[in-house]
Image: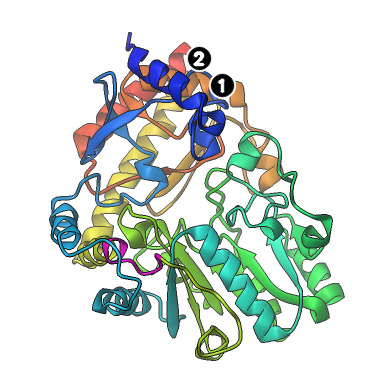
Amino acid sequence: MRKFEISKALFKKASAIIPGGVNSPVRAFRAVGGNPLFIERARGSRIYDADGNAYLDYVLSWGPMILGHAHPRVVKALKNAVEKGTSYGAPTALETELAELVLKAYPSMDKVRMVNSGTEATMSAIRVARGFTGRDKIIKFEGCYHGHADGLLVKAGSGATTFGVPDSPGVPKDCAKNTLTLPYNDTKALKSMIEREWRSIACVIIEPVVGNIGCVLPRSSFLETLRKLTRSRGIVLIFDEVMTGFRVSFGGAQKYYGIDPDMTCLGKIIGGGLPVGAYGGKKDIMAMVSPEGPVYQAGTLSGNPLAMTAGVETIRELSKKGVYKQLEKKSSLLERGLIDAAKMAGVKTRFYRAGSMFCTYFTDLEVVDYTTAKSSDTVKFSKFFSEMLQRGVNLAPSQFEAGFMSLAHTDKDIDRTVRAAYEALKKI
């Protein structure tokens, strides 16, 4: 039996001076019970807590660590960068280098602007879309999480879904009134809304694969229909690829599904584990951004040399031949193993995967949207999570979060994970 005494003490201390003891809600373990792990270090496919326990990690800092933790090339480059200074508040060649790498992988973008988080990226992209169209309303989809800007905390996913509070207090009604919400994968509702409201709709923002209620895949033709409808009505289509960017494929979900959005938001992987975000799009839209245009957006640490360094090194590694074939092989192996483990244990689950992101739902219903995702048995998931943790496997502490594969995970790691899953499923 693993013990977590030091983590418990650290959490108690943190709880006295940090709201909930954590700096991001899902980390608090309230959806699964118990106390959160306090991590001391990580390397490759493993993280190590303050009590000296090691875990195979499928959280990967919620997605960014696609190369694995503390990748030698990234660490070496960061050490060199730190010695030159951590922030200048001035342009560097690194910003242009990372921008070029991103634009090469995402041909839908002509220009890109670096920011510090996914929330900044989505908030800024929507502002630009409103400035470009002269319209105020936006459409988002139930369960899609686009950061914690006021107008986006309406039927959001992520921690909002975990705690059953999709609408946050503190969001003015006058702000939220311009956010229209629709069920994900509901083409009929989408068509009806756009035909009725298109004159006032600036943009549609969507997670092409919904990663903040687990891993919900788009139905056949849903994204194609969305693209056609928005283009026909002059509505800006924004793909929020903060999670799926460089994760679902090298060119993200838009390449994976063959869709050409007007704007794209990125984060996580493009910072190699450091705080970063980015938004970009077609040349005429991005011409609206200050100082080239009238739509204002700024950030003291935007494009800082440390995040740019980690991002450049990460994308260079990902661009090597055969990398995504490796990720697909590893992810497929885990998928088959977890599906078989559930069947052998007699537990009804649904497994979904897009590239190297995935989720196991404890339900026998097909998961296609927010409502069906919420049908999952969170009590069973909580027990499964705890049993896996005791067996040295770290999963996201919520049924409504995706898991991730890294290049550092080995076949032995995956075999061990599958065996642990079978034992855990048998116990619950």
**Nearer-the-camera pick, 183 or 149:** 149
Label 1, secondary structure: give it.
helix
Occupied quadrant, residue 102: bottom left
Quickly name the residue at label 2: 428
Q: Residue 260's x, y, as percent?
A: 52, 78
Residue 224 visible? The answer is: no
In this rendering, the answer to whether 142 lies above or below 241 is above
- Residue tagged by mark 1? 380
Q: Real-space Cα distance between discs 2 and 1? A: 7 Å
Q: Residue at x 72, y 66 (%)?
A: 139
Q: Which of 404 and 9 is in front in this view?
A: 9
Crowding around mark 1 (Cα neighbors within 10 Å: few <14, some 14 to 19, many 20+) is some
Out of 126 and 211, give the one closest to the viewer.
126
**Which residue is more in the foreground, 253 or 392?**
392
Q: Is mark 2 on a helix, strand or loop?
A: loop
Q: Does the magenta stretch include residue 305?
A: yes
User: Where is residue 397 drawn, in percent x and y?
Assistant: 48, 31
Residue 341: x %, y % from top left = 40, 26
